[in-house]
Amino acid sequence: MSAATVTPTPAPAADARISLRGHVRHTGALVRRNLLWIRQDPESMFDALLMPVVFTLLFVYVFGGSIGQALGGGQDGYVQYVIPGMIAMMSMTLSQGVGTGFSQDFNSGVMDRFRSLPIGRGSVLFAKIAVEMLRMLFATAVLMIVAVLVGFDIERWAGLFAAVGLSAVFASSIMWVFITLGVVLKNAQSVQAMGFLVLFPLQFGSSIFAPTQSMPGWLQAFTDYNPLSTLADAARGLMVGGPVAHDLWITLGWSVAITAVMAPVAIHKFRTKT
Amino acid sequence: MKRIDDTPEAAGSAVTVRGLVKHYGETKALDGVDLDVREGTVMGVLGPNGAGKTTLVRILSTLITPDAGRAHVAGYDVVRQPRQLRRVIGLTGQYASVDEKLPGWENLYMIGRLLDLSRKDARRRADELLERFSLTEAAKRPARTYSGGMRRRLDLAASMIGHPAVLYLDEPTTGLDPRTRNEVWDEVKRMVGDGVTVLLTTQYMEEAEQLASELTVVDRGKVIANGGIEELKAKVGGRTLRVRPADPLQLRPLASYLDELGITGLASSTVDTERGAVLVPILSDEQLTAVVGAVTARGVTVSSVTTELPSLDEVFLSLTGHRASAPQDPAPSTEDSREEVAV
């Protein structure tokens, strides 16, 4: 057997620290695990595949005519309006997966195994975030294909990539909220229910699906401060033109603020969970 | 990292626990536990649900921190040196588990990589352990398709990847059928043969006897007895004699007849109608002989007579004078101690 069996004397403290390469290796092994999940269970990609299709068709063909008329561009005008917003919405909804995934890992006991291994706790978090990001990019790609099919005109490729990047940055900050929920709530269903309660008003009380000018004053006050409005408006500016800077900075400001508050909370809850 | 000098560590001790305390609100999951596991031995920790067994294992695996007391594993302090400690332990239990969605091989490969093996070594170790635990044929199937016994074997394999010096087995056979239980026992015996130090928690006296050389009996967070397994068996003093009359109608008359004679051990005889046997607690070979003599004298035809180890209940009855505590204070498992925070 190993030397450790023979000599109980502690080895030098050298292996107490995890090298950067070690962190990369651990995160890689865990990313591989999460990707294998998708291969074992392809249905777990259904939401990322179907949501962009269903929501785009629904909004464009149900509301597109009337909102488009109000906007003054008909249904085609609405497509140009709503698609950048959909990128923002999609990234929010999919970021919930981080929370439900964590919840499942805790309940199945896999997390105890990970936490009893000599790896940095951060590797577990970052691997999950990385895989959710990949899922998000996949959903965005699907969304853009559907968008082009319903008549979206990609005028600025650079703007499109910038909008996707901005959504990803903001989503990564929201993921810390979901990680916290995933750690403190009892099961994946509660995480999903809570996530819905948080996201639904934020998504619909925003400028994602319709301009806010016609909303009552109190609601406008909410939508103006809603980071999803600024994210959607920034994405719109980047992809189809219009003012960008103001919304961009506010969105980035929100991302930094949410991460600064929630990442330490999430990490603390994760570390001290019994 | 220097060794802590005032540690009351016995030489050759792989696990040293002193005055360990862990509270969950009002519940004292551990209430001042002392424990020593000598290197290369198997220590059984026997106790009912809620005795604090799992809490002990979780502290020794650095999953939770104690409220008071000290614990060292392979010389490392559980609170101050968790990273070094994680390198020398293996954990198999009710809660630490494999990833059900991953194939067996992938589970082992992943853990190998997390333990800093090179890709090549991780691959080799996964193959090796699957072979050793007779899982090679199931290597590519997701673990959720495994039978209960295969799952436990994969759990054991996973905890062996890092060549641990100390292995924790937290109720390794709870919920398994007797045949599968034997299978897991055989595997554990082989691992012990390799020189691993094992801390085993269990609710079954039989399991402790099969695997452990020393035993610590815990109840409500306290150690109520400890010592060599033979020593404790002598202390408990009991075996159970199982007498099966050929005619089931003889069951009750035989039981009351034996009780009237007053030749049984601590408790009175009980009847196991399901399996058609009278269970007679006995303390000595003389009592065994006397019971067999009495049955013969009465002219009852017997189809089998076997002796068994006392049940957990009988162990507790003779050690503490009360039955194993009912789980009114349930085991502080992950599920129960999880704090609910509305956000």
Image (spheres, grey):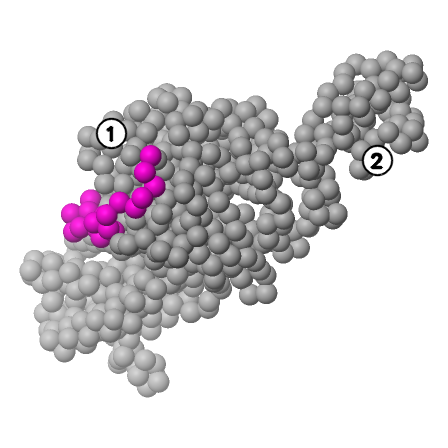
Amino acid type at circle 2 is Ser
Q: x, y (%) of residue B51? A: 60, 50
Asked whether the beta carbons under mark 1 and mark 2 sit within 8 Å of each other, the answer is: no
- The region drawn magenta spans A6-25
Element on which disc 1 rests: helix
Q: Earlier in the sequence, mark 1 or mark 2?
A: 1
B93 in relation to A183, above or below: above
B88 in relation to B239, above or below: below
If the image is split into quadrants, where does the N terminus of chain A sit?
A: top left
Q: For the point 78% across and 29% down, which residue is it?
A: B282
Q: Total of numbered circles in the picture?
A: 2
State the CA–CA distance, disc 1 to disc 2: 58 Å
User: Callout 2: few (<14), some (14-19), or many (20+) C-alpha neighbours within 10 Å?
Assistant: some
In the figure, residue B232 lies in which quadrant?
A: top right
Q: Is residue B145 magenta?
A: no
Q: For the point 6% across and 60% down, which residue is it?
A: A158
Residue A99 appears left or right of A26: right
If the image is split into quadrants, where does the C terminus of chain A sit?
A: bottom left
In this orientation, which residue lies closer to the viewer: B324 or B287? B287
Element on which disc 2 rests: loop
The residue wearing badge 1 is B123
The residue wearing badge 2 is B268
Q: For the point 34% across and 27% down, which residue is it?
A: B129
In this view of the protein, can residue B212 be seen by the observer?
Answer: yes
In this orientation, which residue lies closer to the viewer: B295 or A249? B295
Q: x, y (%) of residue B277? A: 79, 24
Amino acid type at circle 1 is Arg
